[in-house]
Structure formats: C-alpha cells, structure tokens
Image: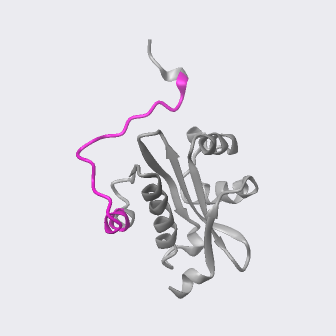
Amino acid sequence: MENELAFTVRDYWAADYPHVADIWERTGMSTPGRGDSAEVVENTLRHNGRLLVLVDKASDTVVGTSWLTNDGRRLYLHHFAIDPKFQGGGLSKPLLRESLQIAKEIGLQVKLEVHHDNERAIHFYEKAGFKRLGDYDVYIIRDLSDIKE
C-alpha cells in the first residue's frame, strides 16, 4: 500500500509518551481512572510487554499505538488506536499485522476487548482472524478502595 510507505511501526520510546497519551485521550482509550501513566507503560514493558507505535515518517510524529501486555499465558492487545486525523487510511493494518507477528514469534494467544457498539473495529478484528469469546462480560475494580472485605 502506498500510504503505508509514509509510515513505520517501531517500539515505543519513553519520549513518545506525550504523543501516545494524547492519542489515547482523543480516541477515548484513556481516562483518568484507567491509570495509563508512563510509569505503568514502563512497568508492562519490563514484564515482557510491548508498545508499538505507528510513526509518520515525514513529521516523525506518533499517529498510532498498539500496546501488548503479557501474562505468560497470552498477550493482551490494549489501546489499539489511530490518531483521528489519520483514521480511514488503512494505517491500522500494518500496525495490527506487526502486533500479531509478535504474538506468532512469542507463540502466545492474543486477546482483546472491543466495545459491542464499535462495529467498525469488530469487523476489522474479525477480518484479521479474531473470534468472539463466548458470552463473557468483563468486570474490573479500578479503585482498590472499592474492594469489599
């Protein structure tokens, strides 16, 4: 794809964080309760995670992210996002392709969550080979003071 030639996928550098955080905020991937700080990113990287960034070669600006965390059993794909100014140009394909290549190389399953109303993303992920995982609902405790004894 011609459009892909103007972009490259590489591993995250700490200096990328302001651009990454901006994309996450503008795409709704990050909210204050999620705790997606630079420290959290670095911690996941120390635990065999990867954060890939899609970079516009002309401006050397991060325009996409794919965050893979590793629990030793499977990889979790988080915060797969393309800057809204660059959406619709096919740029998610090389970013996902590189993310799934990492899963293949490591030999772990890859799992993600997508909002049930996000039909565009669901179609994109299904086209890449993802299958719906039963009828599971996802639960989380974000604020640890909410833990009941």
Left or right position of 128 against 103: left
Q: Residue at 46% across / 72% down in the picture?
A: 93
For the residue pair 149 and 56, the one nearer the viewer reads as: 56
Q: Position of residue 45 (x, y in %)?
A: 62, 45
For the residue pair 114 and 16, the one nearer the viewer reads as: 16
Q: Is residue 49 above or below residue 64?
A: above
Point out the image quarter for the C terminus. Answer: top left
Q: Position of residue 83 (x, y in %)?
A: 59, 67
User: What scheme was used to colour the molecule?
Assistant: one colour
For the residue pair 91 and 83, the one nearer the viewer reads as: 91
Q: Position of residue 109 (x, y in %)?
A: 38, 50
Q: Residue at 47% across / 52% down in the picture?
A: 106
Location of residue 48 (image quadrant) = top right
Indicate whether residue 133 is drawn in magenta.
yes
Left or right position of 85 against 141: right
Dominant secondary structure, magenta: loop
Total numbered badges shown on the rendered structure: 0
Residue range highlighted in magenta:
122-144
Indicate whether residue 64 is drawn in magenta.
no
Location of residue 58 (image quadrant) = bottom right
Query: Which residue is outermost to the left?
Result: 134
Q: Position of residue 4 (x, y in %)?
A: 55, 80
